[in-house]
Image (spheres, rainbow, N blue to C red):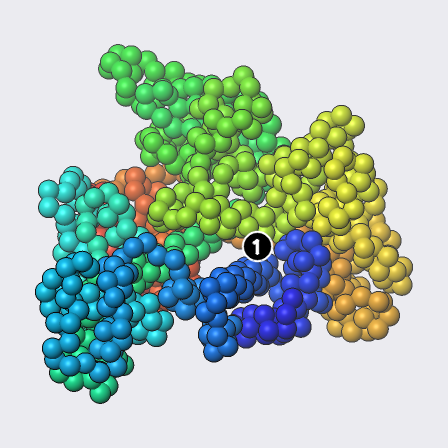
Amino acid sequence: MTATIVERIAKQMKLNERSVRNVVTLLQEGNTVPFIARYRKEKTGSLDEVAIKTIEETYEAIQKVEERKEEIIRLIDEQGKLTDPLKQAIMQEQTLARLEDLYRPYKKKRETRGSKAAKRGLTPLAEDVWNGRIRSDIAQSFIDEQTGLETKEDVWQGVRDIIAEQLSDDASVREIVRTIGRKRSMLTSKKKKDATDTNRVYEMYYDYEERLDSVVPHRVLALNRGEKENVLRVQIEFPEDILQKRIAEKVIRYQKGEARRQLEEAIADSLKRLIVPSIERELRNEWTERAEEQAIHIFAENLRSLLLQPPMKDQRVLSIDPAFRTGCKIAIVDAYGTLEKVDVIYPHPTRSAKQHERAVKEAKSKLVDWLRHEEIRLIAIGNGTASRETEQFVATILEEESFSIPYVIVNEAGASVYSASQAARDEFPNLQVEERSAVSIARRIQDPLSEFVKIDPSAIGVGQYQHDVSKKELEQSLSFVVETVVNRVGVDVNVASRSLLQYVSGINETVARNIVAYREENGRFKKRTDLKKVPRLGAKTYEQAIGFLRIPDSPNPLDRTGIHPESYDVAKQLLAELNISLHEIGTEKVQNVLKEEQLKEWKKTYDVGNETLRDIVEQLKQPSRDPRDSFPQPLLRSTVLTMNDLKEGMHLQGTVRNVVDFGAFVDVGVTEDGLVHISKLANRFVKHPLDIVQLGQIVDVWVERVDVDKQRIQLTMIDPAK
């Protein structure tokens, strides 16, 4: 690790060099991001997981550039063309694009118009034109039937081809085009002739033009999709007159007459045929990468909010997976997530009137019987197909039968993916896919995190354009989010599924499987040290994982906390000094005795960092605290609305179901989610919706406009009365 790289990262991220150096060293020693963030705060300056991950990614990116520098220097040197100034220029570059510009003249190329002209002996004449040293009749002396140069125009065309390629290979010329392209070009799109766009999805882009540096990320992805579907023709239009002038100012200084004319034509040809198409591809890729990064960021933040939704503990749930033709699958899940009953009802019209009437009567009877005799505390309804019709059916029964049981609409994104997975088949081998989905819906309200980790994160549709971004980048980002949340919350090792365990710091799929197998064969883990007996769970894995694994019924109360075993001695010494027993941690006595203002005094006594000591004290005061408890509980309902019930100015409460670049979609209890445009999120400028709202948040909204025909609802979070 060179000091230069650390300095660059620290400067780029505006961080302390010591913190950056320590993070890189800790990562190189095999420590995980969650472990470093939680248990090495003194070394990192209390950097969070995102900052540590960014340091890791930035370090890897810089290393990639450094490795490419070495490779380019080697390749040029092998050609005998490496000079000290060129080597110095390569070593000073910090971007791959500029490095490739410097290497471009030395790359082995396929035969080109310029290389053909060179073979015909026109390189000396091209050099003379470049330097302005030519006679007006010079072209005549190069006419030669054997080389194919039959006319003066053949000669000049060959000269221009050579110069055009030289300009295209010139790093400084390409940088001029790149810089002006970023700042002065236009992104345009036209509908392709005879293109099919049945639902007019891309109508706003049929004749679209906007400055490239003003285009918002989601628009780039929309244009890319329209182009991929052969509806749109998208391109970047460069200000060629400005480019021609700027490059001419650089190239043409003292050349006159024929030399000047040939250079001007070569510049125009090089721009149109070689440089602009190449830089256009580069800028399209650059803007697409930015747009994908933004889309992935939004998806990741939405996923984080979804996973951090608070569990509704101790709830006996009746869940419903709605459907029309195949019926609604219903399940009863006890307070611990154990399936007790599963069935199917047909409350919606899919058959003859007589059959439907009988099916509805049976569905109502079944639901009333379960609600009356099964001690149901909550009803969970999936938000997929037939959700609102099912909600209406349930709400009517609750009102008619005077049940004081609330219901909640549950995001069932990815439920079908989980239900058909091997994990679901292993867990419920005797259930149908839809029945497994009903169980998953219940568990999502009881413990969202434990249930959502069973699903490929990219299958949870909480973002925008997730199908248009790099699959690899998306999976890596979402996996990191899941890992961060799981370790932030902590895991009960005696009940956690293999899906949950494999996201714990240091634990891979194999070790997670071995933990579950060991638990099934030997019974519950009694204490943290028992995990050392699990096959493939070595000393390093134990160190990285153990602080995030909890054993609630361990005889050692510290095993129930987030205190790492490496700090047990400090915790015990502190408690002994204050005359507190281990079994009193978490009691009011401990909370009264352990005061924040005493930290400095204790720090002098114990050989431990200030941040670690503070974490120990917090865990002793609140050993069972779940960080998700600070987030709002899901919005419970007892009645249902329709779009026809909504009136302009009506005040409602709703749940944020999705956050995108241009606003947030809010569930207010009707058929469609309403859109709160970014301009309506607050009575001030909002840079991005994520600055105001997050997925799962309960918000107050007012109805601005309802279009029943188009099934669109426009909402505002700005109180019209203020």
Q: Which quarter of the picture shows residue 572?
A: bottom right
- Across and down, in percent, residue 298 comes to 42, 54
Q: Residue furthest bottom?
A: 254
Q: Nearer the viewer, residue 605 or 186?
A: 186
Q: Nearer the viewer, residue 303 or 194?
A: 194
Total marks placed: 1
Residue 268 visible? The answer is no
Residue drawn at x 53%, y 50% as measured from the top left: 481
Taking 655 as reference, is 515 above or below it? above
- Across and down, in percent, residue 288 comes to 34, 56
- Side of 619 relative to 378 (left or right): right
Residue 530 visible? The answer is yes
Identified by mark 1, the residue type is Ser
Which image quarter is the C terminus in? bottom left
- Side of 558 relative to 489 (left or right): right
Taking 382 as reference, is 44 above or below it? below
- Across and down, in percent, residue 478 comes to 50, 48
Q: Secondary structure at mark 1?
A: helix
Taking 520 as reference, is 157 above or below it? below
Q: Which quarter of the picture shows residue 28?
A: bottom right
Q: Mark 1 — residue?
A: 630
